Image (spheres, rainbow, N blue to C red):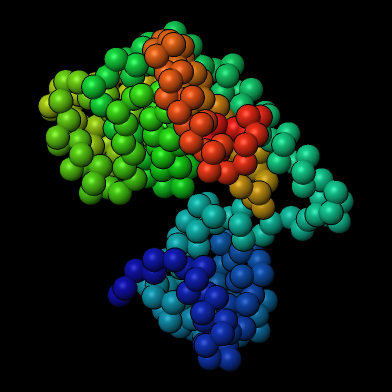
Amino acid sequence: MKTPADIITRLQLMLQDGTKSDRKLAGFVLADLDFVSKAAISEIAARVGVSEPTVTRFCRNLGCEGLRDFKFYLAQAIAIGGQYLSPEPLSRDAREQRIASAITEAAISAIQRASENLDMTTLVAVAARIAVSGNVLCIGSGGISSMMATEMQNRLFRLGVSVLAQIDGQLQRMYAAVATPDTTLIAFSVSGYARSVIDAVQVAQQYGATTIAITPPDSALAKVADTVIHFQSLEDGNIYKPTSSRYALLSIVDMIVTSVAETRGPRVLENLRRIKQSVNTLKVDDPRLPLGD
């Protein structure tokens, strides 16, 4: 029998397209996941007003062997994504008055936590390595990590660093394969378990590259990289807003880039001047505007 990949989605489809009894059972399960995950078949049948064989047939229609098998997949779904299945309703105050403060306060807290737990000695050493690298390869997979790899490229090229970002898994491995001892590879992973990123780090090491990971300590990526800047993502449980950890990770990127700029010294200034001159000439002549942003 085919194993259900996502029991919640199957229940939702059953609620729409199942038989009358299946729709009734599916609606009951989705409305009270906790009860169904613990109840006996007789209790479920009595609550819904169907027979026990109907409950068993319902489970099999979902792709399970029976109720026990169904409850296993249901418990798994609750453990993984339960917070998204029965969220607390937002209060009117939260919807209409507190969105701005919720975002800004969470961002500030995330940056402060990251700063307090950061080993600045390691960060400055990483910046010193980047500053003298022949070329830098920034990699990351997924929403936050890929964005940070791209942002690192955006910040370093202005300083005269030969840098490239790759967020495609296959290209990460390909570019890692042409690394040299002059290459510094910077790997971002909020989880520490992005397979393509780990593989690229190991490939680049074969060719003498220096590898740096910005990732949780003791993760799979942390274990293979030469140097690790520890970054632990901690969220506040608000499932309606985007993750605040990206602000903290961005602050680490900015710290590294600032240190690289200071290490390279006055020679970065001509590049910055040219960018400022070019952008302001093409756009609005206002020296107060950010540099190319």
Residue 24, relative to residue 199: is it above or below?
below
- Residue at the spot 47% in from the left edge and 56% down from the top edge: 76
- Residue at the spot 38% in from the left edge and 30% down from the top edge: 157
Quadrant showing the C terminus: top right
Residue 217 visible in the shown view: no
Residue 103, relative to residue 74: is it above or below?
above
Residue 168, relative to residue 189: is it above or below?
below
The part of the image, by quadrant, that contains residue 244 is top right
Judge left or right: residue 181 versus residue 219: left
Q: Position of residue 206 (x, y in %)?
A: 13, 27
Q: Position of residue 289 (x, y in %)?
A: 63, 33
Q: Position of residue 243 (x, y in %)?
A: 59, 43
- Residue at the spot 34% in from the left edge and 25% down from the top edge: 161
Quadrant showing the N terminus: bottom left
| Residue extending farthest bottom | 20
| Residue extending farthest top | 121
